[in-house]
C-alpha cells in the first residue's frame, strides 16, 4: 500500500534542507522546518520574507515552496508523521535527544544521508521512550547543492541517478523508498538492510580519503584564494588507488559478514561502481577512477575546505571540516569496528584514521596501537549500544530492534 504522509518535519537549515523543502511542498506535503538554533530560524524566516524558497536545478528548472512553520520548539516539531534529518551525522544525536520525548507512536524517522550506525542511534531513542516506529537510512544525499541566498535560494549542482534506502524494520523499505521517490523526485531503491547502508556509506571513503590524499604532505603553506586545490578534481592516480584500497577493506568486511553470518547485505558497492552508477550522466571520461572523479561535472570547481589563516593572510586547510568531523567518527570508525568484529584487516583504513585523527586532535588508537583510543567515545560505534559482536549486530539489524540493549554508554 502506498505510504501517504501529510506533514513532514525537516531538521536542519543547511544546503540539503533548502532543496528538500521546495520538493516536498511541490509534491503535496505540509513541511515544518526545525532547527534548535534561534539565529538560524530567524535567518530562515528573514529569507522567507523576501520571497518563497527556490531550488534552482542545472537544467533551468526552478522549484518554489516554503515551510508552513519554522520552529525551534521540539515539541511542536515532533508532532508530524515523518521526521527527516538533513544534517551532518554529528547533529543526529542532539536532534534525536531533543525530538524523541515528543514523538508519536508509529513515527517514521530517518536521515539523508544516514552514514554509519544511524539506525542503532535512532532505535535507541525510540526504545528509550517506549515508542514503536520506523527508522529509515538514506545511503547518500540525492543532490550536490549549495545555498546561494540563505532561506531564499539554493543551487543544485548535480542530481544522483538513484539513492539506496534501508529501514528498521527492513520490510518498510519499499514503501518509504516509493514515498521519497515521489516527493523528492529522485529514484530511491530499497536496500537489503541498514547495515548495508552503514557499510556502503561512500562518504566515509571519499571524504577522508581525498583529504588524506591531497593533504598528507601539507607543509603549512598559506594558500592565496586562487591556490586552494580542487577537491574531487584534485584526485590523482595515487589518491584513486587509496580510495580503492579503503573501499576494498570495507567491501571485504561486508563479504565476510554475509558469508559467515548469513546476513544479506545485497551488494555493498566499491567506490568506482558507486561513482559510475550515481553520476553516470555527469562523467565525461570513465576510463579510470581518477578520470571519473576529475571529469564529473557535478563536482566541478569544489575546493578543499579552508579556514582563514589570519586576517588578510590567506587560507589553510580546515582540518575541522565535516569531511573529517562527520565522515571519520560516524563513518570510517563504524566500519573499522565492524571489521574488527569479523577479523578483517584494515591497514589502509587505519592509516587514514590515524592521520586524520591527528589533524583533528583525536586519539582513536591507544598507546599500544589498539583500536581503543579515548576519543572513540565520541564516535557512533555498535559497542555504544551494547553490541560487541557480529552475531548480535546482525541480529539487531535483521529484526530492527534494540531490545537486547541494557545500559547504553552513549546517546
Ligand atoms: P550544511 O552544513 O549546509 O547544514 C548543516 C545543518 O546542520 C545546519 O542547519 C546546522 O545548523 C545543522 N547542525 C549542525 N550541528 C548541529 C547540531 N549539533 N544540532 C542540530 N543541528 C545542527 O550541511 P548540508 O550541506 O545541508 O549537508 C547535510 C548532510 O548532507 C551532511 O551529512 C553532508 O555531508 C551531506 N551531503 C551534502 C552534500 C551537499 O552538496 N551539500 C552532498 C553530499 C552529502
Image (cartoon, helix red, strand yellow):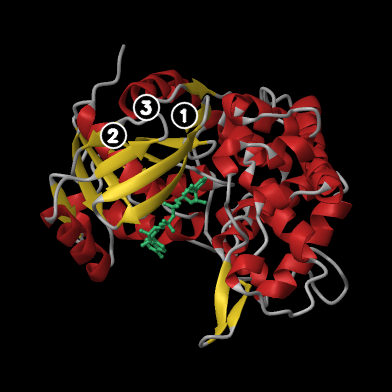
Query: Residue visible at 80% across and 73% down?
Result: 366
For mark 1, what is the residue? 169
**Position in image of residue 242 (x %, y %):** 83, 48
For mark 2, what is the residue? 62
Helix, strand or loop at disc 2?
strand
Residue 268, can we see it? no
Q: Is mark 2 within 8 Å of ligand 1?
A: no
Helix, strand or loop at disc 1?
loop
Query: Residue visible at 64% across and 55% down?
Result: 383
Q: CA distance from mark 3 to mark 1?
A: 17 Å
**Position in image of residue 256 (x %, y %):** 81, 32
Q: Nearer the viewer, residue 2 or 168?
A: 2
Instruction: Determine contact: label 2, label 1, CB under 8 Å.
Output: no
For mark 3, what is the residue? 180
Q: CA distance from mark 2 to mark 1?
A: 36 Å
> Dividing the picture into quarters, in which one does residue 343 lie?
top right
Helix, strand or loop at disc 3?
helix
Most distant residue in the top direction: 1
Q: Earlier in the sequence, mark 2 or mark 3?
A: 2
Number of marks drawn: 3
Q: Earlier in the sequence, mark 3 or mark 1?
A: 1
Amino acid at each position: 500500500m502506498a505510504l501517504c504522509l501529510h506533514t513532514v518535519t525537516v531538521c536542519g537549515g543547511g544546503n540539503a534542507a533548502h532543496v528538500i523543502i521546495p520538493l516536498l511542498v511541490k509534491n503535496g506535503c505540509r513541511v515544518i522546518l526545525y532547527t534548535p538554533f534561534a539565529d538560524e530560524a530567524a535567518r530562515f524566516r528573514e529569507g522567507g520574507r523576501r520571497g518563497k524558497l527556490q531550488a534552482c536545478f542545472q537544467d533551468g528548472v526552478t522549484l518554489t515552496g516554503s515551510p508552513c512553520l519554522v520552529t525551534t520548539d521540539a515539541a511542536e516539531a515532533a508532532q508530524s508523521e515523518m521526521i527527516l534529518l538533513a544534517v551532518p551525522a554529528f547533529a543526529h544525536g542532539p536532534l534525536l535527544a531533543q525530538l524523541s520525548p515528543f514523538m508519536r507512536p508509529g513515527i517514521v524517522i530517518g536521515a539523508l544521508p544516514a552514514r554509519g550506525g544511524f539506525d542503532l542511534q535512532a532505535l535507541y531513542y525510540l526504545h528509550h521512550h517506549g515508542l514503536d516506529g520506523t527508522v529509515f537510512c538514506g545511503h547518500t544525499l540525492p543532490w550536490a547543492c549549495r545555498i546561494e541566498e540563505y532561506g531564499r535560494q539554493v543551487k543544485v549542482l548535480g542530481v544522483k541517478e538513484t539513492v539506496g534506502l534501508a529501514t528498521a524494520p527492513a520490510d518498510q523499505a519499499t514503501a518509504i523508498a516509493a514515498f521519497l521517490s515521489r516527493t523528492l523526485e529522485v529514484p530511491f531503491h530499497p536496500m537489503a538492510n541498514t547495515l548495508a547502508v552503514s557499510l556502503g556509506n561512500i562518504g566515509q571513503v571519499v571524504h577522508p580519503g581525498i583529504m588524506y590524499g591531497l593533504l598528507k604532505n601539507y607543509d603549512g603553506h598559506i594558500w592565496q584564494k586562487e591556490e586552494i586545490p580542487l577537491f574531487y578534481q584534485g584526485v590523482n592516480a595515487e589518491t584513486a588507488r587509496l580510495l580503492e584500497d579503503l573501499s576494498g577493506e570495507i567491501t571485504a568486511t561486508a563479504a565476510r559478514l554475509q558469508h559467515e553470518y548469513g546476513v544479506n547485505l545485497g551488494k555493498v558497492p566499491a567506490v568506482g561502481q558507486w561513482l559510475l552508477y550515481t553520476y553516470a550522466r555527469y562523467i565525461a571520461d570513465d576510463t579510470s577512477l581518477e578520470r571519473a572523479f576529475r571529469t564529473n561535472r557535478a563536482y566541478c570547481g569544489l575546493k578543499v575546505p579552508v579556514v582563514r589563516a589570519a586576517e588578510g593572510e590567506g587560507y589553510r586547510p580546515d582540518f575541522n571540516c565535516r569531511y573529517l568531523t562527520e565522515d571519520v567518527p560516524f563513518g570510517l570508525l563504524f566500519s573499522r569496528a565492524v571489521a574488527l568484529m569479523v577479523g578483517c584487516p584494515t591497514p589502509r583504513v587505519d592509516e587514514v584514521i590515524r592521520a586524520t585523527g591527528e589533524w583533528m586532535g583525536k586519539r582513536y588508537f591507544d598507546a599500544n596501537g589498539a583500536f581503543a583510543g579515548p576519543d572513540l567515545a565520541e564516535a557512533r560505534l555498535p559497542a555504544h549500544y551494547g553490541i560487541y559482536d557480529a552475531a548480535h549486530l546482525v541480529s539487531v539489524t535483521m529484526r530492527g530492534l534494540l531490545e537486547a540493549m541494557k545500559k547504553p554508554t552513549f546517546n
